[in-house]
Image: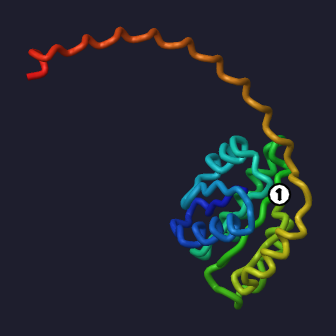
Amino acid sequence: MLVSSVSSDSHTWNLVFLQLLLEEMGHDVTNVGSCVPDDLLVEECRRVRPDLVVISSVNGHGALDGARVIRRLRDEPDLRGLRVVIGGKLGVRGSEAGSYGPELTAAGFDAVFEEATGVAEFRSYLSHAGPPALPAAPALPAAPALPAAPALPAAPALTAAAAR
């Protein structure tokens, strides 16, 4: 799994929490970090080939930045089938702004977890998620074996006079 924030969010505690939660649940996690530019997220998705991308935002700009980044991911033919979810504080007005879920799922997210939802719904989603949507990256060829290093000459023996 790949954990990331959106490009405008410099918070890291949420990403560390998610990484630890996912690892506790038995998942391998790559944490891309905070303030991740859209192009870097695309590159990391290609490099890691995750089963799921989890985007977290706590600065209140998750809906705006998230809609942009999911369009970017869905525009890439090799990443279209990638499962991507978003959660956290998705807007600056909190619950008075209403739900961002319908807007963000229409933009291309597979699931949206708003801050009031809590972790239980996210855990439930993970336990019911199907098999990976992307095929595994092709295996890299094995590196050729290096030739054996030449043997070093034996050190000269010390004589009693030289040892003094």
144 in relation to 5, above or below: above
Q: Tell me which colouring the rendered structure shows.
A: rainbow
Provide residue 69's location: percent of width, then percent of height: 70, 57
- Residue situated in front as seen by the camera: 102 or 25: 25
Residue 131 appears left or right of 76: right
Q: What residue do we see at 66% from left, 60% from top?
A: 3
120 in relation to 135, above or below: below
Residue extending farthest front: 160
Callout 1: 10 Å neighbours few (<14), some, many (20+)?
A: many
Q: What residue do we see at 78% from left, 75% from top?
A: 122
Amino acid type shown at disc 1: Arg
Residue 25 appears left or right of 155: right
Residue 36 appears left or right of 45: left
- Residue situated in front as seen by the camera: 109 or 142: 142
- Residue 53 is drawn in which quadrant? bottom right
Secondary structure under badge 1? loop
Q: What residue do we see at 8% from left, 22% from top?
A: 164
Q: Which residue is identified by label 1? A: 83
Residue 80 appears left or right of 59: right
Residue extending farthest bottom: 96
- Residue 68 is drawn in which quadrant? bottom right
- Residue 19 is drawn in which quadrant? bottom right
- Residue situated in front as seen by the camera: 88 or 2: 2
Rendered-image quadrant of the N terminus = bottom right
Provide residue 86's location: percent of width, then percent of height: 73, 68
Provide residue 50's location: percent of width, then percent of height: 76, 51
- Residue situated in front as seen by the camera: 52 or 159: 159
